[in-house]
Image (cartoon, rainbow, N blue to C red):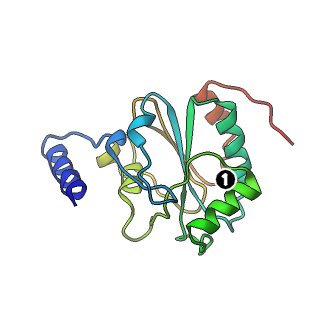
Amino acid sequence: MLSIVKKAVFLIYNKLNNRFLRFFDLEIEDLEGKNLDIAAMEGKKIMLVNVASACGYTPQYKQLQELYEACDGKLVVIAMPCNDFGKQESGDEATIRNFCETRYGVTFPITQKVQIKQDPHPLIQWLCNKDQNGKMDAEIGWNFCKFLVDESGNLAAFYPSSTSPLDEKILNWLDISIDIKT
């Protein structure tokens, strides 16, 4: 309860003082119901992706894992399961974890399921609203949209589902080149 009150006071203070909400002050739980420590990610680049296990873009999990490994701790990939688009993430937390680990070898953080269309999670609100992130408005139209956040917690870019995690624009932002595995 204190956390909710603290967040409300922080949001009101920022609105009154024309300040944007800091990314590293946001909170979300992982699949196990534990707080994912976003503040500890400061100093790293972050890619947040709304994901679903039964989507045509689901094979991007392989590319996300490859990118996560290639960046060797300089990038955090955060998967945010969502059932809002085509009801393509209907499983519970254990099902999602098992699917990601056994099918794609996922080792990056996976959050609790999030809402995007109705009653969006505060993290989704921050990513999609210029009045909160200070950068841009973005509309998530389907699963596997990608948000890039820089080391200082600034929203750097938004890419739609059709953009591969290994797209040249993303690799250039990360300042890396990787050999794509077949």
Asked if 108 appears above or below 151 in the picture, the reply is below
Asked if 123 appears above or below 88 in the picture, the reply is above
Q: Quadrant of residue 81?
A: bottom right
Position of 131 with respect to 50 (left or right) is: left
Position of 135 with respect to 158 (left or right) is: left
- Disc 1, SS: loop
Q: Nearer the viewer, residue 165 or 95?
A: 95
Q: Position of residue 144 (x, y in %)?
A: 61, 56
Position of 2 with respect to 113 (left or right) is: left
- Amino acid bearing label 1: Ser
Residue at (63, 60) in percent of width and height:
97
Q: Quadrant of residue 136?
A: top left
- Mark 1: few, some, or many residues within 10 Å (few <14, many ≥20)? some
Residue found at the very far right of the displayed protein? 182
Residue beneath disc 1: 162
Q: Position of residue 93 (x, y in %)?
A: 56, 66
Q: Position of residue 123 (x, y in %)?
A: 39, 53
Q: Nearer the viewer, residue 44 or 98?
A: 98
Res. 148 in view = yes
Q: Position of residue 1 (x, y in %)?
A: 22, 61
Q: Quadrant of residue 119?
A: bottom left
